[in-house]
Each structure stands twice: as structure tokens, then as C-alpha cells.
């Protein structure tokens, strides 16, 4: 019943549902208290609505947006409370008193002050919005002023409206005590603080504090492009949750020869982008993009097949390459859209064969095998487990855009997998790292994820209280305390490197100040490695963990684990680089033979049914080398999927970029010659 109510109310937790109910019931109670009249009932109901409303805003509840859509938005709710205060005054016998008229006048004046405050905030936000967002690009010629303090610009409507609390409290105290001075003090504080808010905003609406006109900013970007002359760019468009697809290529881009650049299309991706010294240019507007001079670019790399790719694919002077964001047997890996590119780069022979079997129009001569440069940090398996008990990583993919049961093991097998690992006869440590998109489309997937999380947390609590692990826990207390202290130190330094200790910044100011600093980038990368290492030391090698977010990296989980359970996704192909045993779930129940036939990456896997009874074979392969019958198959599959170890993937990738750039130069020279134009460099 509660879960159904949560779905109907579009809230994410029981506490949000409770707050929503308090808001819904609170206003009728305030009205009833004003009509009766009952001062204390009115005060209590009013306080409840203030607190519940504030909680919903703090949670970012979806319900808040829905209330605004049905004419019950934030300002309306505050106005209704104020009107009911007027009604209470009238019902309490103050209808002909001076206090009544002063309260009405002050609340009307307060309402009037909200308009200029909202207008100034809107003006500042609009006029400080650049047509582009940049990182590591010098925009000094644009002269962007400092951003207004966060205290003025963060949730400004809430801050302004909540100033009526002083009036509300003052009037209620005046009614209770009979001393009208309390009301006048409260009303006066509301008006004075509202005026102060306006005065504080005034300096930031001056033209000198706003950003220059759009044309000047675009001209500055054009001047930078003319000076930098990028030769290879990574193009990316998508939601903020898909930023990981671009992040996985940042280090590769930094290692390429020539002059690399990152070209993004959505503003909300920029804050999600990992640290890089490569220039980043985000151009949301299609017209602005088309007007940029990208004639120096020879190779454009695409990490995802999305509609906005067409805005750059139209440029014939560069060669266009689909590099994707992982190697897998998913249908997305053979998308017919891929034939619009000049070349498609795959990790190994398997990618080439997939396109041949799919017969979607991608020609074999347009496919280049370049390896997977990102996998360089994955350590090869030593043949023995890292700790006294095996660590198994469960990394299911998300539910996908349709309801195909083969998309993810989470729905049909997830709880069985987790339960069997937690209850294994020989102790196992479980790491659970779900896909970032898990639960974004399917409420069922989100519910299963929450149940699995609860199962693991409960198992971790039981293990922490189990005397069998008390000795290990006591022995590692000192080391874990030192690791936690190191984590705090690293996090403080990372925060300092990221923001210089200043938080009152906006998009324009960040574009101005975020310049390339190779030393800072190198220190940040080193600290992130140290953070991951310290994070593992801060917890026992027997402790189960639920791992979410980008800070704990997937490949670090690979290195920490002895085996993995996953689904048909690029995670499986990447894990194969480690050479460790792995299992893949046949959630669609195709049968082992058909499942292996359809999916290259499972040829060396333990195949799980939805009951997950086959997990014993995976655990045996980890603990007993003699039971690992798929070791040789994994070695062969690794080369087939990911290509040879030598030359390294980054060398293969850089050579492919250089070769394609040469083809682009040859094409441009040929076109120029045929048109009788001088050949440019």
C-alpha cells in the first residue's frame, strides 16, 4: 500500500511521502484553525507545513514540480498561509483594529517586493549565461566578472518567501500576549530583510557585472580556435547520467598526438566531466556549432550514436569515426546508424565479426581494430585470490529501453545471485556495483536494486557482529583508522584542487577560470588513485560493500575482486582483460548453447540460470586452479575481443588517428585541386 502511494505521489522515500501528506493535510488544518478560531492549532499546523514544505524542497522531490503545475506552487502556498493569517486576525476580533490593517498592508508590500527580487535574479541568471561553456580555454579577452555569492542566487524564491516567518511569528505572539508590538517587530523584520535582499542584488545587475554579448563571446572562442587549431576532437551528446561514456575517453584523448579537443553539446554534462587538461568546448546551440571554424580538425571521434551527431557529421573536411563506449554483444554494438561514419573502430576481431554477422551496412574495410586504451589500469590475474576469502563483484547492467528479459539479470536473477553469494558455504565477500542508469526507466528494477542493497547491508551488519571476524577486525583497526584519516586528507586536497576553497561560482565564472593546469591534473589523478587504494584499506577484506557513484571506479573493483558476475554488456568484455573467472546470466533463458552462440563474450564464462545455482562452479574456479577449466578459453577470448597486448592499445589508437588524419588531408587536397583552390595546411 505504501509503495503504491509512493509511486502515485512520485516520491522517492517514505519520509517524502509523509512530508507530502503533511503538506496536503496541513493547509486544510490551517484554514479550519483560522475559522474556529484556535490560535495554537493554527500555529502548530502552520509550523508543520513550513517544515514539511522545506523538507520536500531540500530533497528535490518531484512532487514539488507537480504542485506548481496544478496552481499550488511555492509562492501560492506562502500566499495562502498569509491570507489565512489575515482570516485568523479577523476571526479573533481584530478586524477593526489597527493591527489588522497594518498586517494586511505589510504583507501586500512584502508581496510587491517579491516581483523585483525575482526579476533581478532572473536577469542575472540570463545575462550570465554564456552561449558556450568551456574548460581549459582562455577567455581573458571576454572579461567575465565574478559571479554573485551563492547565498543570493541559490534557491532565491525560497529564501525570499521564508522571510514571512518573522511576520507570522510576530502576529501570532501578539495575539497570544495582547502586545501588538511583537507583530510590528515581526512585520518590520520581514520588510527590512526583503529590502536588504534587493539591495544586495543591485550591484550584480549592473552591465559591468553581467557577461558580454553573445557575439563577443563567440568571437573570442573563434579566435581561440584559430590559434589552437585542433586536429582531433571527441564529440559527445547525451544526458548528464551518460557522462561516463565521455569520461572513459578523456585520458586517451590526453595521450594522443596532435592537438585534441572535447566537443560537448549539453551544458549539464560539463559539471559531470572528469578532470582533464584537454580543452573542452560545450556548444548547446546547433547554429552556433555550425558557425564555428573547425577546418583544422581532421578526425572527429563519436562515443555514442545520438541525433545531434548530425550537426558535426555534415562537415566533410574531417573524417568521422564511431568509437563507442565499450565492447559488448548488445544490439547497440551493431547499430545500423554506424554506417554514417567514415570508419568504425573496434577493440578486436570480435567487433569486426559482429558487424559482418549483423549485415547492417558497415563495410569490413571501414572497420579498424584499435584495442581498448582504457583497460591499461586493469591488473592481470595472478592465478590466486587476493585475500583469505574470495571477493566476487556483481556488476549488472541496467534494464534498457525495452522490457526484454535479457537486458539485465537484476530483475529475474539479481536477488538469487546475491542471496547465494551471501549464503555460500565457504565465506565470500560481495561487492555490488550497479549500472548508473539502474532504475531510471523501470520502477521494478529500482525496487529490486533497493532490496539487494538492503540484503547486502544487513549481511554486512551481521558479519560485523560475527565473532569469526572479530580477530581480523581488531588486528586491522590501526590500519583502517590510518586509511580513514588518509581519505579525509585526500578529499580535502581534492576539494581544494577542484574549487580553490570557493563555492560561490557559476557556469560563466568557471569557464573563465578553468584553465589547463597539467600539474594540477597530474596531482588530481594521483590523489584519486590514492583515494581508491585508501578506501579499500579502510574496510576489511571480508566486508560486503554496495558501491555507487563515480568516485569508486569500476576498474578498481575489477582489481579488488577475484571473479565477477554480470550481464551482456561492455563490463564483461573489459573484465576479460583481467583474465579472472567470470559468470554471465542467461536471463532470457535461451539455453547455454544458444546463449554462447549469440554472445561472443560468454564463450569463456560460467553461464548462470536465473536461479544462479551454477555459482558454485565460479567459486570453485577461484579457489581451486584445478577446477578452473575455462582458463585457456579466457586467454584466447581476450585476444579475440580486445586485440593483441603489443603494441599497446594507446599506440594502436594513436596510429589509427594519424592514418585517418592523413586520409582527411588527402581528401581535402584533392577537393581543393579539383576546384582550383590553393591547398591549405
Image (spheres, rainbow, N blue to C red):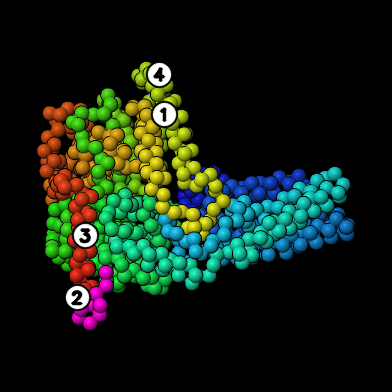
From the viewer's perspective, is 422 left or right of 270?
left
Q: What is the number of callouts on the image?
A: 4
Point out the frontmost of discs 2 and 1. Answer: 2
Point out the frontmost of discs 3 and 1. Answer: 3
Q: Tell me if residue 405 comes above or below residue 617 in the rendering.
A: below
Residue positioned 37% across, 35% down in the render: 530
| Mark 1 residue crowding within 10 angstroms, few (<14) / some (14–19) / many (20+) | many
Image-quadrant location for residue 574: top left
Q: Secondary structure at mark 2?
A: helix
Q: Which residue is mark 1?
A: 483
Q: Earlier in the sequence, mark 3 or mark 1?
A: 1
Q: Earlier in the sequence, mark 2 or mark 4?
A: 4
Determine the CA span between mark 2 and mark 4. 73 Å
Span highlighted in magenta in the image: 670-681
Point out the frontmost of discs 2 and 4. Answer: 2
Determine the CA span between mark 2 and mark 3. 18 Å
Q: Which residue is mark 2?
A: 670
For the question of whether residue 598 can be seen, the reply is no
Q: Earlier in the sequence, mark 2 or mark 1?
A: 1
Amino acid at each position: 500500500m505504501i509503495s503504491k502511494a509512493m509511486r502515485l505521489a512520485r516520491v522517492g522515500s517514505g519520509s517524502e511521502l509523509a512530508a507530502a501528506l503533511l503538506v496536503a493535510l496541513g493547509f486544510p488544518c490551517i484554514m479550519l484553525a483560522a475559522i474556529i478560531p484556535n490560535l495554537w492549532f493554527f500555529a502548530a499546523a502552520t509550523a508543520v507545513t513550513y517544515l514539511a514544505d522545506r523538507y520536500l524542497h531540500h530533497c528535490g522531490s518531484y512532487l514539488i514540480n507537480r504542485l506548481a503545475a496544478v496552481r499550488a506552487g511555492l509562492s501560492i502556498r506562502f500566499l495562502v498561509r498569509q491570507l489565512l493569517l489575515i482570516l485568523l486576525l479577523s476571526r479573533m476580533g481584530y478586524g477593526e483594529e489597527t493591527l489588522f490593517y497594518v498586517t494586511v498592508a505589510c504583507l501586500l508590500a512584502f508581496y510587491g517586493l517579491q516581483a523585483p527580487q525575482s526579476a533581478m535574479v532572473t536577469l542575472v541568471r540570463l545575462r550570465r549565461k554564456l552561449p558556450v561553456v568551456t574548460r581549459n580555454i582562455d577567455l581573458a579577452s571576454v572579461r567575465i566578472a565574478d559571479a554573485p555569492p551563492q547565498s543570493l542566487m541559490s534557491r532565491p524564491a525560497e529564501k525570499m518567501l521564508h522571510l514571512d516567518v518573522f511576520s507570522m511569528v510576530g502576529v501570532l505572539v501578539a495575539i497570544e500576549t495582547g502586545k501588538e508590538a511583537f507583530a510590528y517587530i515581526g512585520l518590520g523584520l520581514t520588510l527590512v530583510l526583503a529590502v536588504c535582499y534587493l539591495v544586495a542584488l543591485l550591484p550584480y545587475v549592473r552591465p559591468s557585472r553581467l557577461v558580454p554579448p553573445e557575439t563577443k563571446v563567440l568571437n573570442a572562442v573563434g579566435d581561440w580556435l584559430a590559434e589552437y587549431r585542433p586536429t582531433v576532437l571527441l564529440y559527445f551528446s547525451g544526458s548528464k547520467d551518460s557522462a561516463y561514456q565521455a569520461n572513459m575517453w578523456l585520458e586517451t584523448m590526453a595521450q594522443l598526438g596532435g592537438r585534441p579537443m572535447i566537443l560537448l553539446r549539453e551544458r549539464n554534462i560539463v559539471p559531470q566531466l572528469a578532470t582533464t587538461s584537454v580543452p573542452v568546448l560545450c556548444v548547446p546551440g546547433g547554429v552556433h556549432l555550425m558557425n564555428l571554424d573547425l577546418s583544422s580538425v581532421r578526425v572527429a571521434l563519436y562515443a555514442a550514436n545520438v541525433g545531434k551527431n548530425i550537426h558535426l557529421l555534415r562537415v566533410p573536411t574531417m573524417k568521422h569515426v564511431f568509437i563507442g563506449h565499450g565492447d559488448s554483444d548488445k544490439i547497440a554494438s551493431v547499430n545500423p546508424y554506424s554506417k554514417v561514419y567514415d570508419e568504425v573502430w573496434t577493440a578486436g576481431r570480435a567487433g569486426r565479426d559482429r558487424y559482418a554477422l549483423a549485415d547492417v551496412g558497415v563495410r569490413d574495410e571501414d572497420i579498424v581494430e584499435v584495442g581498448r586504451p582504457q583497460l591499461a589500469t586493469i591488473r592481470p590475474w595472478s592465478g590466486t585470490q587476493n585475500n583469505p576469502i574470495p571477493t566476487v563483484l556483481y556488476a549488472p547492467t541496467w534494464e534498457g529501453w525495452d522490457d526484454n528479459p535479457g537486458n539485465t539479470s537484476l530483475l529475474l536473477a539479481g536477488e538469487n545471485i546475491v542471496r547465494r553469494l551471501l549464503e555460500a558455504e565457504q565465506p565470500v565477500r560481495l561487492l555490488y556495483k550497479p549500472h548508473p542508469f539502474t532504475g531510471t526507466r523501470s520502477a521494478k528494477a529500482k525496487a529490486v536494486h533497493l532490496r539487494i542493497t538492503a540484503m547486502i547491508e544487513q549481511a554486512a551488519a551481521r558479519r560485523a557482529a560475527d565473532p569469526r571476524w572479530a580477530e581480523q577486525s581488531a588486528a586491522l583497526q590501526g590500519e583502517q583508522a590510518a586509511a580513514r584519516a588518509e581519505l579525509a586528507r585526500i578529499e580535502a586536497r581534492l576539494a581544494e584542487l577542484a574549487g580553490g576553497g570557493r563555492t560561490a561560482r557559476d557556469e560563466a565564472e568557471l569557464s573563465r577560470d578553468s584553465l589547463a593546469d597539467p600539474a594540477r591534473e597530474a596531482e588530481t589523478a594521483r590523489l584519486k588513485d590514492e583515494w581508491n587504494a585508501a578506501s579499500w584499506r579502510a574496510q576489511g577484506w571480508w566486508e560486503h560493500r554496495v558501491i555507487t557513484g563515480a568516485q569508486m571506479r569500476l576498474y578498481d573493483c575489477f582489481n579488488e575482486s577475484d571473479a565477477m558476475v554480470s550481464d551482456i554488456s561492455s563490463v564483461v568484455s573489459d573484465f576479460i582483460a583481467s583474465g579472472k573467472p567470470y559468470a554471465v546470466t542467461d536471463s532470457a533463458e535461451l539455453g547455454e548453447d544458444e546463449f554462447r552462440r549469440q554472445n561472443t563474450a560468454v564463450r569463456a564464462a560460467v553461464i548462470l540460470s536465473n536461479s544462479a545455482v551454477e555459482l558454485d562452479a565460479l567459486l570453485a574456479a577461484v579457489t581451486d586452479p584445478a577446477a578452473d577449466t575455462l582458463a585457456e578459453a579466457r586467454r584466447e577470448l581476450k585476444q579475440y575481443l580486445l586485440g593483441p597486448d603489443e603494441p599497446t592499445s594507446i599506440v594502436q589508437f594513436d596510429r589509427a588517428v594519424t592514418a585517418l588524419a592523413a586520409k582527411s588531408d588527402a581528401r581535402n587536397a584533392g577537393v581543393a585541386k579539383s576546384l582550383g583552390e590553393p591547398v591549405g595546411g
